[in-house]
Amino acid sequence: MKKLGQLTILILIAAIVWGYFKPHSDQVAMSIEKLVLTGSSTVAPLVAEIGKRFESLHPNVRVDVQTGGSSRGVTDTRTGLANIGMISRALKKNETDLLSFTIALDGISIIINQSNPVSSLSKQQIIDIYTGKIINWHDVGGNNAPITVVNKAEGRSTLELFLHHFELTNTQVKPHVVIGDNQQGIKTVSGNPNAIAYVSIGAGEYEAEHNIPIKLLPLDGIGASVSNVHNRSFPLSRPLNLITSKQPGGIAKTFIEFARSVQVNDLIEAQYFVPIAN
Amino acid sequence: MSAAVILLILIFLLNESLSIFQHVSVSRFINDASWHPQQGLYNITPMLSATILSTVGALILATPLGIASALFSYFYAPKFLATWYRRLIELLAGIPSVVYGLWGLTTLAPLIAQLHPPGVSLLTAILILSLMVLPTVALTVEAAIAAVPASYLQGAMALGLSRWTSIKCIILPAAHSGITSGILLATGRAIGETMAVLMVAGNVVQHPHSLFDSVRTLTANIALEMAYAMGDHRAALFVSGLVLMIMVLLLVFMAAFFKRKPAYV
């Protein structure tokens, strides 16, 4: 009996090891159409969700989403390694050979505690606060209290957009707290009257409207709101695009149309991006 | 069997972190200026010190309290109270860590921020961790005390020793090995704790200069960055996992070493 148990365990381990190392056998069923998307790690989680829903509607399609950054998306689309590329920015001037399709917008807002009397900060003030040149709210017209700077963990798209907009590198930022997701940032700021953080605008606006004591600071005089991201006037935002090398046809066309339709708005909002279809 | 599983985990960790060791030398994980993996800086020592400091701090608080709690419920509390007290401790042991973390972030951190901002800090992490490992210590110590033969206590009573003297000189030394393994078990739990620490420690990668500085532990580092990490960044996170695994293995060997010593009595 004991031997039998040991045998079972051995077989189990063997199965796990084999499953781990075995080659992928995707080519087995020839009737299945495969759609490969590569690119930005910001867009990839969203597209993966959209892909799942797309697969359930089109059972003969497999959507394969791979990350690697926006530049990989551009390269793979040009070389044909990917059917569709994903980029978390607009196309550059030297990329006009490609076509882009915006599926959602990404915006972030600076948040502070509601009890903080500061009502706006200039771009330079935000840079000085995040690089540790201004360390007291008194210097920007607030109470005499030390500023708690909240930054995001490496790899997050909000961090990338924030650094890009303020032309900083992450080594220059001198944080007191580092957070992972938006909720953690909102909890930190709502519990600390002297904290400053930045979060996805969708998450920030939702919580501020639901009596969480935070306020969203305007930037360059433009209010931080989903609608201002939607009409593209808010400066701290960017489009999330799908790109193709030529006018898409067949299953790629269907997918892009699906990703831009109202059918995926709930998926976009779940990731705190701003949908464009309405 | 369990050895095979541990071996598989080690092989997996080594396999995943191998890609970075091919072009980044081991010394850079100790000597780099900071931890900014996207800019090619991989110093993990601040997180190692944070892990060790928060664990040691939590144990310094939780060990005496845990032993005191076990002695109280076994020797001093009236029977009715002891039963309920033990249930309470067991309940405390069963609360998910994320709940402790949430409480720490929304209640404890603002309190500490009034003392010294930012509130989320090494101290907050130590307090939350000690609260979490306290039931582990209390329950294992109580089990160790209960395992001491009743004749020891009867003998002590027959000699006319006071209750405290018999606890101090007979029960605790006899239960010594069980208490040690309970503390080591708690250490393992404190080192491995992720979610609660992630929420209350502040997660800035730095060697703390005071209890109020924000720190990031190795476990929090993995949880914080793994979801969006790619390439070398991802491999560097597996290196922190490897370091953590080695720490826990050392701890287990230490436990085995202590176990081998015969009981005092």
Image: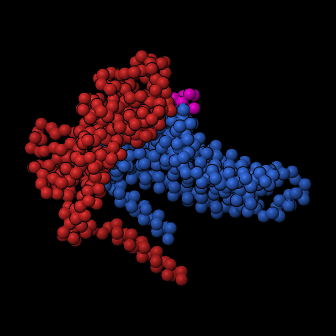
Chain colours: A red, B blue
**Residue B192 belongs to magenta span:** no
Quarter residue A36 falls in? bottom left
Q: Residue at x 64, y 49 (%)?
A: B134
- Residue B182, percent from left and from top: 64, 56
> Please, which residue is most extreme toward the front here?
A278
Instruction: Using residue A193 as the reference point, say whether residue B255 is left or right of it.
Output: right
Give the vertical position of B139 relative to B55 (above or below): below
- Residue B253, percent from left and from top: 55, 59
Quarter residue B174 falls in? bottom right
Q: Residue at x 25, y 36 (%)?
A: A238
Residue B149 in view of the camera: yes
Give the vertical position of A200 relative to A255 (above or below): above
B87 vs B128, nearest the viewer: B87
Q: Quadrant of the N terminus of chain A?
A: bottom right
- Residue B146, percent from left and from top: 74, 60
**Residue B114 belongs to magenta span:** yes
Residue B33 in view of the camera: no
Q: Quadrant of the C terminus of chain A?
A: top left
Q: Residue at x 55, y 51 (%)?
A: B96
What span is in magenta?
B111-117
Q: Residue at x 43, y 62 (%)?
A: B9
B187 vs A208, nearest the viewer: A208
Give the vertical position of A24 relative to A51 (above or below): below
Q: Main secondary structure of the magenta part?
A: helix
B255 vs A101, nearest the viewer: A101
